[in-house]
Every structure is written in structure tokens, then in C-alpha cells.
């Protein structure tokens, strides 16, 4: 079974609309997705989406570590950020291999914006973080790193490196699958990734229309 998973922690800009639009885009673009799951601390009712309660009070992006919980393991899991737009065929994502998005700015570093794994092969990410979350959330816990911001992907990259589980990068394994939003040029990839302050709801009109699921001429 193939599961697409996303995480929604309350207190930010995201709500059920983001889950609904991500799910609709994924259904249109990935034929073999069996389940769409949202880990959340909110009471959501989104058609076609299974909601699973977050077990911990980890703030902000740190709640994404719950996606690696062993009790959520499936044959293949795709972890995807809510601010992602599917614009075309993305069937290539259903590939039986460990992979992660390469950080757009820090080459050679893992980004948690998009990840793929089999079964519970990444359960140790959750287990190690859960043992001492306060320590891992502390800047410097992973030693000297090039990242300007200490967040979940710094810790994920560090743990994967030290455990020898280096994933293939999606951009290398599936060239052209991911595109990065840039208002100065047309989007080409079937999956559009937003970085920093850029978001689908404030993007150019064409991008917003695609996010809403509108068919463009």
C-alpha cells in the first residue's frame, strides 16, 4: 500500500483547505496512491483524507518527526509538505527506494519537504528524537552545520548521516520531477516546491489557479 502523508500542526497559517488541495492534487497526479494521511492536532473532516492525531506537543516543524512513527509504517510512504502543488503526472514517485529532496540551497543536504521510504526503515528518526526532543531542538545539537536555521531537516540529515542511511536525492533519481517556485519564470515540473516566504496562496495567479485545482487553457 502507498501512503502520502502530510503534517498539520495548529497555530500557523495552514488549515483544512491546504490539506484538501494537497490531497486533490496528489490524487490527480499519482495514480497508485492508496491512502492520504494527515497527522494533526486539529479536528479535520476532509474527504478522502485519514486524520491521525499527533501524539506529542512538539512545536512547529518538529512535529514532522511523528511521520516516522513505526505504528504508521506502510509499504511505501511519501512525506509531503502542505505547501506543495501537483501540476501533472507524478507517478514516478511510486518507486521502491529510499529518497529525499535535496536542499535547494545546501547541496548534498537532506530536505524534509519531500521524502520517501519503505516500511519502518526510518523509524529510528522518530525514536532518537523522541528520547530527548529538547536536546535535538537546541541549536548546535548536530554540531557545525551550514544551515542558517536549526530545524527538523538539520536533525534528520544529521541522524541519517551518522547512521549510514544516506537517501538518494529525488532530483537525481527523478530529474525534472521537482520544480521550485520562481515568480520570474513559468513552472515546468509536475511537482512545485515552495521555499521560504513563497506560498501557493500568495503566488502568481497561474500558480494559485493550479493550487485550487483549476484546469488552465
Image: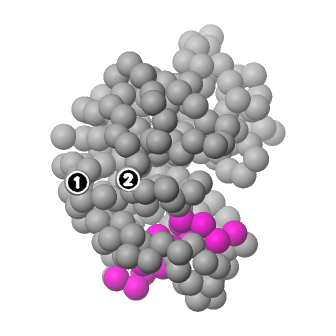
Q: Is residue 94 left or right of residue 62?
A: left
Label 1 secondary element: helix
Q: Is residue 135 left or right of residue 78?
A: right
Residue drawn at (26%, 50%), measured in percent from left and top?
A: 72
Quadrant (top left, top right, bottom left, bottom right) of the C terminus: top right
User: Is residue 31 a member of the stretch shown in magenta?
Assistant: no
Q: Quadrant of residue 170?
A: bottom left
Where does the image place residue 74, in percent across and percent down from the top left?
A: 21, 48
Mark linked to residue 71: 1
Q: Residue furthest right?
A: 184
Indicate the colouring scheme: one colour
Task: Please tell me the numbered disc located at residue 50.
Answer: none
Disc on res. 55? 2
What is the span of residues highlighted in magenta in the rendered image? 149-163
Q: Which is the main secondary structure of the residues drawn in magenta?
A: helix
Q: Where's residue 9, x and y in %?
A: 54, 45
Whole-percent x, y for residue 178 in the image: 53, 46
The spot of residue 147 in percent (x, y) is: 67, 74
- Residue at (40% x, 85% y) in the render: 162
Up the image or down, 60 lies above or below 147; here it is above
Q: Nearer the viewer, residue 8 or 194?
A: 8
Q: Decide if residue 60 is in sight here.
A: yes
Upstream in sequence: badge 1 or badge 2: 2
Mark 1 vs mark 2: in front: 2
Q: From this viewpoint, is residue 171 visible?
A: no
Amino acid at each position: 500500500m502507498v501512503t502520502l502523508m502530510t503534517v498539520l500542526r495548529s497555530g500557523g497559517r495552514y488549515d483544512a483547505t491546504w490539506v484538501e488541495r494537497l490531497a486533490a492534487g496528489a490524487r490527480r497526479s499519482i495514480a497508485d496512491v492508496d491512502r492520504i494521511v494527515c497527522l494533526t492536532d486539529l479536528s479535520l473532516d476532509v474527504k478522502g483524507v485519514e486524520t491521525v492525531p499527533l501524539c506529542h506537543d512538539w512545536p512547529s516543524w518538529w512535529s514532522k518527526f511523528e511521520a516516522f512513527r513505526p505504528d504508521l509504517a506502510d509499504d511505501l510512504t511519501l512525506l509531503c509538505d502542505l505547501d506543495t502543488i501537483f501540476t501533472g503526472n507524478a507517478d514516478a514517485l511510486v518507486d521502491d527506494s529510499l529518497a529525499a529532496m535535496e536542499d535547494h540551497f545546501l547541496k548534498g543536504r537532506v530536505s524534509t519537504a519531500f521524502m520517501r521510504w519503505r516500511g519502518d526503515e526510518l523509524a529510528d528518526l522518530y525514536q532518537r528524537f523522541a528520547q530527548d526532543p529538547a536536546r535535538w531542538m537546541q541549536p548546535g545539537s548536530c554540531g557545525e552545520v551550514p544551515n542558517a536555521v536549526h530545524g527538523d531537516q538539520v536533525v534528520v540529515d544529521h541522524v541519517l548521516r551518522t547512521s549510514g542511511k544516506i537517501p538518494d536525492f529525488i532530483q537525481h533519481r527523478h530529474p525534472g520531477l521537482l520544480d521550485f517556485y520562481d515568480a520570474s519564470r513559468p513552472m515546468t515540473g509536475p511537482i512545485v516546491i515552495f521555499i521560504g516566504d513563497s506560498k501557493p496562496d500568495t503566488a502568481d495567479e497561474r500558480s494559485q489557479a493550479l493550487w485550487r485545482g483549476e484546469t488552465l487553457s
